[in-house]
Amino acid sequence: MTKALNRRDFIQNTSAILGVASVASGFTLTTFAADKGPASGGKRWGMLINTNILSEAEIDSMVSACKKEHGWGFEEHSTGSQKPSWIKKVKVQDRATKKITSLPLMCQHCEEPPCVDVCPTNASMKRLDGVVLVDRHLCIGCRFCMMACPYDARSFVHEDLSNQKEHMPRGKGTVESCTLCVHKIDNGEQPACVASVKTDAVIFGDLKDKNSIISKTLRKIQSTQIRADLNLNTGVRYSGI
Amino acid sequence: MGTMFAQYSNNLSGNSDATYRTDPFHESISSIRKMHPELLKHKRNETLRHGVRTEENSLKECVNCHANINENTGHYIDVNKKGQFCSSCHKKVSISVDCFSCHRPTPTKGGS
């Protein structure tokens, strides 16, 4: 004999089913946010470059990895100073000791970026996770940001381009610079230059995560920002300079 | 649904992936024709400024599906070339396609 469903049983059963459904949909939403969701302000991407370990050959490989990843450096009609340079090898010498250090220099992804301050069209922008980018849809090519950048990190495209990379649209009349390989970061990968160095000389990670390797290393070893006097709080830090 | 996709099978996308697609990707032909500038504009901000990298309304996916292959060479033809998917309508209404001065007009997959 089947038991008739009374009101109390009905409410109990229904709430149990609804409970499962809401948990399940919650899971779906959470997973989606982790995979394809927007950049979060809870993160700040940064890089630590240890020039004591990093060899000149490795710096060259970082530059060529960047060129290959983003397709710059193959401009035929630009003169030497016009050619784009997203990352370059810089040699610095201590005036007193005469010690020469080589380091890779690219956009330092400042927390207070001067390029963003001066941009008249909001094309120069900072993502919530600290990556500084140029929105070329809005860029009018005025090059104020190039003048404002203390690191000479930005380049202007002087010629028509073709055969661009699918993930990196580039075109004449706009300014460009290191993107910290956002297309890779968003997919959980490391930037191309970091991946090209096989040693621990270049570490990439989340500066806001206290347990990330970069945060732990920064707590342990001496590091500095280039032009720390400008108080820009750069995302790219150096050790050994 | 058959008639909807039959409209794609014109000489503009003769041998593109969109021609052979059986599942509906766009809400309707008329909505994508009318709304694609707004959808792309919204998506570009989502992707560049907020890092949302989904396939929906992404220009890369437009190109991936709608670029034709040159049967003689086996290479993709630029979607903005004369008579191709984008330029056929844009030329008719005299609106330039600016996307491809920066964006790649052919898919990277399986061709050049």
Image (cartoon, coloured by chain):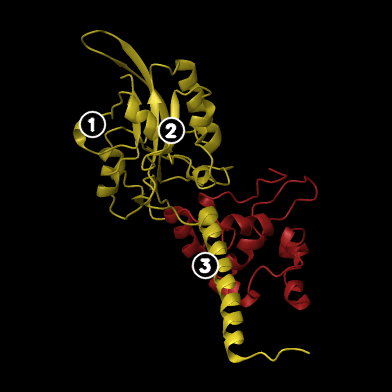
Chain colours: A yellow, B red
Towards the viewer: A115 or B100: A115
- Mark 2 and mark 1 lie on one chain; the one further toward the N terminus is 2
Task: Estimate the x, y position of residue A178 in percent, counting from the top left.
Answer: 42, 38
In the displayed structure, does residue A189 sit left or right of residue A209?
right
Reading the image, the residue beneath label 3 is: B39
Towards the viewer: B72 or A48: A48
Q: Determine the secondary structure under disc 3.
A: helix
**Residue A228 shows which numbered tag?**
1
**Are discs 3 and 2 less than 8 Å apart at CB?**
no
* Residue type, numbered disc 3: Leu
Q: CA distance from mark 2 to mark 1?
A: 23 Å
Q: Is residue B61 above or below residue A1?
A: above
**Residue A213 shows which numbered tag?**
2
In the displayed structure, does residue A44 sit left or right of residue A97?
right
* Residue type, numbered disc 1: Ala
| Quarter of the rendering occupied by the N terminus of chain A | bottom right
* Residue type, numbered disc 2: Ile
| Quarter of the rendering occupied by the C terminus of chain A | top left
Towards the viewer: A50 or A10: A10
Q: Which residue lies most toward the top here?
A: A97
Q: Residue at x 51, y 25 (%)?
A: A197
Q: CA distance from mark 3 to mark 1?
A: 42 Å
